[in-house]
Image: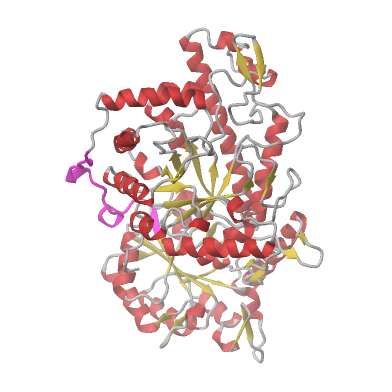
């Protein structure tokens, strides 16, 4: 995988060695003065117009059943008292919308209380307490559950329950008339799972395109939209009939959002939509608002800690996984491989998996097939959906779909990135680098966008990792469409003229860097339109453009661009790949972290990817094999000592337990090792 650009890598090895010899990085941990150390969110002033949303479900007097995410009544009373005594101020939807429109700002420590599903305990237990406080709240019932006749049992996600466990429309009307309870929507009849892939996963009906095992076909986009539109219309009408006003708050079942549904929801007048992501809310993201899920019936100490913490800067720990290692022509063996991977990731206790969505069995970086349904490329196996869901729900990690940006083996008529050769004056595809489609070819861009849209429709995931193939050297792109783009931007129309003086070369370099950034941003927009605005982004960057900014000309990658445009910048912190002598690897890593740290706040947006394999060729071998797990763990500890909290490694070899779990977990896990 990360094996391209040999002609610059050898040069970089020399430059790095000279820099290290000169003492550019000291082999000691960084000392941070106390006044410069990170401060937890709970110790900072409450930001203007920020509010924290709490997500409750059922309230029970004893033995709170976690099937219903229940909280014991006395614990609920304690929690409300704690909020009051510590200065938290519950606010209404009206207050939030008014503040967004420039009206009265929200108070400090603003809290929005929400209650999902429509349990009758809200009427009998929670509402009387909130009414005594005079506190507003949001109730979001699922329409079909409230519609169930009194003499029938409810079908609660396949579990039959007594009808009196849920509210009636009469009770909902009464509470809405109190002026304290905003009635939202939790779908009409989509709070359940639907078959989402051939392997049998049941996934949230409001966000996935269902799979038909008889026809072996997925729900069409038109059918999916029609199903959503009908459901949204039904629950909107029911709430309007009962309360006299259209609902304004949408709460996703299971917290899983859909960008497609958001478009329909917005057309029906909804102003706020809530997930179950952690964090505080801001007024500029009301249609993708996080909530703190109150589970599993937390004691007051845990509740207070979670509320006070709000949204500390995230730290992620990553295993970068090849689905090529999971796939086998025998589906049963694929399942065994996947089970082994899921168990390993669960045992590792990390936060995130960068999961390959494309196939590259040859390891040459040119993508000829993918692991999701699409008409743009052949599908090697319908595997990404299955693997992502299993990892999210069994190993409890976030999934970033790892995808190339340009290296797809599509129609030969599409323009490829070509390199100008000074000796011949001709432009050809460089066999030493990724074979990329030209980002200046509108037809190539269109097909790549289609690939990303098909990926977004095929699975539920949390983010996109853009591969390291999005590069252009100081002799690329030399194709006719690229040259036309340069001329349109006011640049010379030949590579020779573009390289003729330093100032022109710099302008050309910046133009290419921005072109790649803009294209990935376009891809992100298309994915978010389908999957939802909560989708995060990460992009791999080579180490050289960070350590030697002038090398942007060789890559069209710029650290400041990355930090400004992606949620996570992912440097390939791979000293051996960069031909750094083993004895100097620590100093090299220190220098890499220190360079990123010169940008204020950059370490909070950077995840360093270490190498767990040594790709340098050896006589008679493709590479030297796995890196010693103890060395990898040492590198991880080194990054932390230098101030880098987020890091990971590539590749994970679950089949051979490499890196070794018992060695790597203490270094990479975010859990309180070994007690959790």
Question: How far across and how far down the image is residue 260, in percent?
Answer: 65, 54
Q: Quadrant of the N terminus?
A: top right
Q: Residue at x 51, y 45 (%)?
A: 537
Question: How far across and how far down the image is residue 178, in percent?
Answer: 48, 75
- Name the foreground residue: 628 vs 466: 628
| 54 lies left or right of 589 | right
Q: Is residue 597 visible?
A: no
Q: Is residue 122 above or below residue 600?
A: below
Question: How far across and how far down the image is residue 204, in percent?
Answer: 62, 66
Residue 60 lies in the magenta stretch: no
Q: Is residue 122 above or below residue 104?
A: below
Q: Which residues are magenta?
A: 28-51
Which secondary structure type mostly characterizes the magenta part of the structure?
Answer: loop
Q: Quadrant of the C terminus?
A: bottom left
Question: Which residue, as the protein is rendered here, is positioned at the far right?
Answer: 215
| 301 lies left or right of 196 | left
Q: Residue at x 34, y 65 (%)?
A: 306
- Name the foreground residue: 533 vs 358: 358
Question: Which residue, as the protein is rendered here, is positioned at the far left?
Answer: 34
Question: Which residue, as the protein is rendered here, is positioned at the far front?
Answer: 620
Question: How far across and how far down the image is residue 417, in percent?
Answer: 64, 25
Res 467 → quadrant: top right
Q: Is residue 265 above or below residue 640?
A: below
Q: Residue at x 63, y 58 (%)?
A: 385
Please say which color scheme the image uses: secondary structure
Q: How many numbered dots are placed on residues in this image?
A: 0
Q: Is residue 201 visible?
A: yes
Q: Is residue 13 above or below residue 248?
A: above
- Name the foreground residue: 139 vs 344: 344
Question: Which residue, as the protein is rendered here, is positioned at the far bottom?
Answer: 151
């Amino acid at each position: 995988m990360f094996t391209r650009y040999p002609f610059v890598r050898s040069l970089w090895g020399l430059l790095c060695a000279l820099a290290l010899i000169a003492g550019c990085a000291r082999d000691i941990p960084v000392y941070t003065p106390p006044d410069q150390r990170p401060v937890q969110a709970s110790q900072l002033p409450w930001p203007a117009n920020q509010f924290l949303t709490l997500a409750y479900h059922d309230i029970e007097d004893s033995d709170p059943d976690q099937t219903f995410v229940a909280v014991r009544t006395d614990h609920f009373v304690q929690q409300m008292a704690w909020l009051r005594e510590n200065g938290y101020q519950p606010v209404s939807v009206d207050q939030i919308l008014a503040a967004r429109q420039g009206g009265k700002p929200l108070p400090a420590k603003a809290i929005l209380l929400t209650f999902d599903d429509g349990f009758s305990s809200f009427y009998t237990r929670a509402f009387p307490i909130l009414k005594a406080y005079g506190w507003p709240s949001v109730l979001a019932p699922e329409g079909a559950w409230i519609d169930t006749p009194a003499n029938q049992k409810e079908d609660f996600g396949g579990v039959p329950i007594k009808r009196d466990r849920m509210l009636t429309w009469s009770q909902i009307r009464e509470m809405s008339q109190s002026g304290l309870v905003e009635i939202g929507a939790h779908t009409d009849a989509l709070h359940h799972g639907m078959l989402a892939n051939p392997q049998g996963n049941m996934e949230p009906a409001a966000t996935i395109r269902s799979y038909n095992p008889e026809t072996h076909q997925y729900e069409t986009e038109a059918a999916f939209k029609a199903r959503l539109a009908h459901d949204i219309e039904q629950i909107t009408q029911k709430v309007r009939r009962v309360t006299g006003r259209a609902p304004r708050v949408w709460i996703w079942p299971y917290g899983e959002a859909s960008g497609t549904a958001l478009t329909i929801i917005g057309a029906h007048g909804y102003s706020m939509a809530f997930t179950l992501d952690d964090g505080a809310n801001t007024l500029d993201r009301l249609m993708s608002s996080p909530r703190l899920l109150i589970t599993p019936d937390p004691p007051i100490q845990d509740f207070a800690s979670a509320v006070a913490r709000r949204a500390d800067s995230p730290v992620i720990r990553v295993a970068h996984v090849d689905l090529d290692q999971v796939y086998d022509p025998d589906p049963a063996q694929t399942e065994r491989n996947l089970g082994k991977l899921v168990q390993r990731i669960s045992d590792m206790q990390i936060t995130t998996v960068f999961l390959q969505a494309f196939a590259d069995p040859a390891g040459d970086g040119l993508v000829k097939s993918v692991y999701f349904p699409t008409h743009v490329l052949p599908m090697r196996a319908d595997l990404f959906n299955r693997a992502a869901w299993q990892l999210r729900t069994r190993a409890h990690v976030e999934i970033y779909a790892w995808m190339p940006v340009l290296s797809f083996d599509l129609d030969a008529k599409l323009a490829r990135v070509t390199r100008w050769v000074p000796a011949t004056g001709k432009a050809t595809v460089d066999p030493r680098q990724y074979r990329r489609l030209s980002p200046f070819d509108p037809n190539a861009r269109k097909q790549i966008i289609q690939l990303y849209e098909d990926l977004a429709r095929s699975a539920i995931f949390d983010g996109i990792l853009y591969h390291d193939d999005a590069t252009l050297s100081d002799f690329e792109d030399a194709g006719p469409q690229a040259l036309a783009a340069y001329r349109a931007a006011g640049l010379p129309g030949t590579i020779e003229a573009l390289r003729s003086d330093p100032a022109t070369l710099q302008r050309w370099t910046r133009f290419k860097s921005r072109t790649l950034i803009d294209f990935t941003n376009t891809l992100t927009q298309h994915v978010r339109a389908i999957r939802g605005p909560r989708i995060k982004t990460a992009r791999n960057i080579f180490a050289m453009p960070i350590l030697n900014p002038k090398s942007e000309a060789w890559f069209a990658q710029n650290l400041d661009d990355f930090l400004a445009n992606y949620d996570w910048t992912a440097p390939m912190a791979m000293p051996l790949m960069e031909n750094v002598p083993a004895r100097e690897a620590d100093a090299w890593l220190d220098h890499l972290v220190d360079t990123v740290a010169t940008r204020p706040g950059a370490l909070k947006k950077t995840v360093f990817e270490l190498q767990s394999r040594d790709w340098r060729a050896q006589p008679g071998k493709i590479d030297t094999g796995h890196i010693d797990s103890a060395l990898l763990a040492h590198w991880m500890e080194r990054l932390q000592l230098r101030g880098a909290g987020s890091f990971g490694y590539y590749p994970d070899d679950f089949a051979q337990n490499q890196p070794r779990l018992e060695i790597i977990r203490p270094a990479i896990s975010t859990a309180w090792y070994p007690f959790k």
